[in-house]
Image (tube, rainbow, N blue to C red):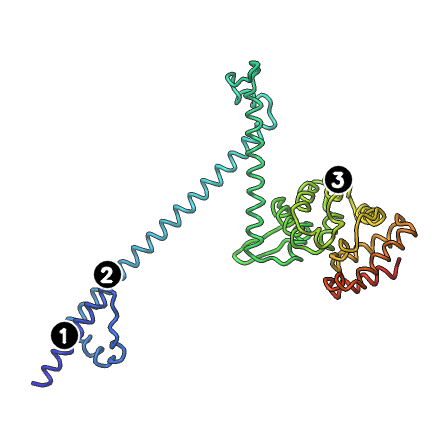
Amino acid sequence: RQASRRADLLSAQDDNRYTEATLGHAPTDTYGKRPLYDRALRTVSATYATRQDLKAHQQQTAFMNDIKDLETEIAVSGLIKNNAQRQQHSEFAEQLINSKELREKAGGNVFKDKNGKLIGADAALASAIATSRSEYAKSVDEARQIIEHYGLSSEQRQDLALGRKTIPLSGGVILGGDSIFVREASIKEQVKYGTAAEVAELLSELPLEFRSVLASSLAESGIKNRASFMGGKLIDDVGKGEIRNRGDLMNYFAEWLQGGKYKPETLASTDADAVKLLIEAVNTTSVITDKKRQDIKDVINTILTDRRLSANVTDAAKEQFENFRNIL
């Protein structure tokens, strides 16, 4: 009789636990009384309920997997459609830009200025140019997102910017310098985050087709805080295509030194890599006069001896400033 009452109690407790579980409440004593719980589950009613729940769970899981597969298909189809539309818009924009006849046709004969002149063709051209530039900028930004996502090193970005290497990444992604969008994105990132030596390499070696992006990247970057001579007129010269090789760049640096438009406070912020560039400029050109060499020495002496200025100069930069002073 006691055994029968004990069995009834266990069954009631098990029913209660089952009800709580279906409502999202986990009984606190389930695992502490696991042996009793396991015996209770072996009753016919509990076994039946568990089987029914398992079947329902399997059906629900299969249903949810079907929904996920459908959502994936919808998302893929959406991307295909979006990419196809972008390609179509880009191609039509290029056709408008290159065809006077098509621009006039697209402009119609209704859009006129205040003097009655038809300006629809000009409006079509402006719209096409805006579309072309927007799509180009979007593609460059997409390449930049990939570069940032995979955390490429400065060396890898430099190789991509100069078109030297193809870089395989996880997930079957391959970035190569044969893509103009990847190269432009890499140039922007390197001018922004690279060393003065790396930026100088880009300025010296990139072909003229990248001069515009180089100039704009220089203007937007903070490299002037590390190398004060990499701003101002240099940006204009790069944009005009006047810096074509290493020799042109070194001549510019030497002329900057000869011009003397800097103070100890300005030059003191120059990092070690940037000082090396100035040393190279002095060693490879004949622009700087003896008098100016002495002036530069005086500036360096002030940087190294002034307590306030020298406190902000790194040890590596101090070493290069001393090397610089020794060759003057």
Q: Earlier in the sequence, mark 1 or mark 3?
A: 1
Relative side of 196 to 166, left or right? right
Crowd around label 1: few <14 · some 14–19 · many ≥20 (10 Å): few
Crowd around label 3: few <14 · some 14–19 · many ≥20 (10 Å): some
User: Where residue 12 is drawn, which disc sits there?
Assistant: 1
The CA distance from mark 3 to mark 2 is 71 Å
Using the rendered view, name the quadrant where residue 126 is placed. Answer: top right
Q: Earlier in the sequence, mark 1 or mark 2?
A: 1
Residue labelled with disc 2: 56
Question: Which amino acid, mark 1?
Answer: Ala
Q: Secondary structure at mark 3?
A: loop
Q: Is residue 54 above or below residue 224?
A: below
CB within 8 Å, label 1 to label 3: no
For marks 1 and 2, give the one nearer the viewer. 1
Q: Is residue 119 above or below residue 61?
A: above
The CA distance from mark 1 to mark 3 is 88 Å
Instruction: Name the residue furthest top.
Output: 116
Crowd around label 2: few <14 · some 14–19 · many ≥20 (10 Å): few
Q: Is residue 120 above or below residue 279?
A: above
Which residue is drawn at the image coordinates 56% and 43% (left, top)?
Answer: 139
Which residue is drawn at the image coordinates 25% and 77% (left, top)?
Answer: 29
Residue labelled with disc 3: 241
Q: Position of residue 83 (x, y in %)?
A: 49, 41
For marks 3 and 2, give the one nearer the viewer. 3
The CA distance from mark 1 to mark 2 is 24 Å
Which residue is drawn at the image coordinates 15% and 73% (left, top)?
Answer: 44
Relative side of 292 to 242, left or right? right
Question: Which amino acid, mark 2?
Answer: Ala
Q: Nearer the viewer, residue 304 or 111?
A: 304
